[in-house]
Amino acid sequence: MKVIKFFESDRKAHWLAEIKKSDWRASAFLHRLLSENTFFDVMGERSEVLLLTDGDDLISHCTFAERDDIQPTDLTPWVGFVYTFPKYRGHRYAGLLFDEIERLSKSRGIPVVYLSTNHIGLYEKYGFEFLDMMNDIDGEPSRVYVKRFALGDNIEIERIADDRILEALALAWKVFLEYESPDYSPEGTEEFKKCLHDENYLSGIEYYGAFYGETLIGTIGIRAEKRHICFFFVDDNYHRQGIGTALFRNLLKDYPSETITLNSSPYGVPFYKALGFVPTDKEQTVNGIRFTPMRFG
């Protein structure tokens, strides 16, 4: 058995005929996209069709695509058109396709993939986690799953060069809007936005970044004189992979055995407690920004 890429095969006509043998209407749609040369128009230019084969026989197929049936959405890429022929079921052969998707994702620096389905209990066996209910292009509800890939030793943490500080602040704003702004009043969100452009406020902050290749995926800033952390954010695609913890532990190398403070948003309190921070006062609100003062060490 081996996984091949349809578009790299010199036997496309044969594999098209194999796909056509499926009695699943989604396979029929995939066959039409491939036959009419409209696959990339619909699925995206960097999309792939993966085939698990045994000699001349097709065992399973799926797509690894920029788009799927959940539209419009910013989520990408997607695993779709997952099908195993009946006589091969029960052996988890689809897992071989998912292994190939993980390899492709890591080679492209992609930390997560998404999948839309109405199955419950199937894709969980392959490491997918339920994310949310979303409507597909026909307006019908669908279960959206996500699979996250461990990044291993591919993460580098280092001081952020001056020419990338604006990128770090843009990351902070992006993550703030999704995870923290919902807990704030409009006044609080506007106040945070002002801080990102206030040269006096930003003065004296040292920034550390977590990099996956050349991509900045996390940042932590510390006001060195006061030993006070600010702008501690990790791109949501890389959550729950230890990136935030690694950033903080790296910062501690430059500030060993010292007391460090921060003001945590409501969303961040459990995370900071897990790092070893303790609240020093009750939650407060200043200029619409809710925070709990916390201390480490």
Image (spheres, rainbow, N blue to C red):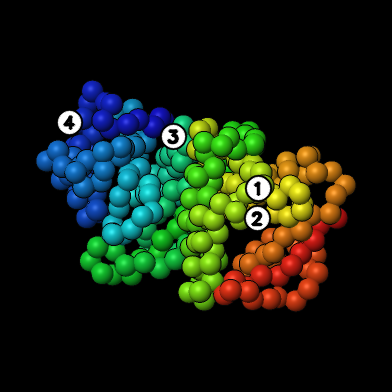
Outermost residue toward the right in this view: 257
Give above or below for 64 relative to 138. Answer: above
The residue singled out by tag 2 in the image is 230
Whole-number angstrom distance, CA of label 2 to CA of label 4: 58 Å
The answer to which of marks 1 and 4 sits earlier in the sequence is 4
Q: Earlier in the sequence, mark 3 or mark 1?
A: 3
Which residue lies under the disc numbered 1? 205
Amino acid type for the residue under numbered disc 2: Cys
Front disc: 3 or 2: 2
Q: CA distance from mark 1 to mark 4?
A: 60 Å
Residue type indicated by callout 1? Ile
> Of all residues shown, which one is farthest toward the top?
10
Residue at the disc numbered 3: 108
List x then y, in percent, for residue 204.
Answer: 67, 47
Q: Are marks 1 and 2 in contact (CB under 8 Å)?
A: yes
Disc 3, disc 1: CB below 8 Å? no
Tag 4: residue type? Ala
Does any portion of residue 9 appear in the rendered image?
Answer: yes
Q: Determine which quarter of the picture holds residue 206.
A: top right
Task: Report, in whole angstroms, how far the alpha carbon at label 3 lies from the one at label 2.
Answer: 31 Å
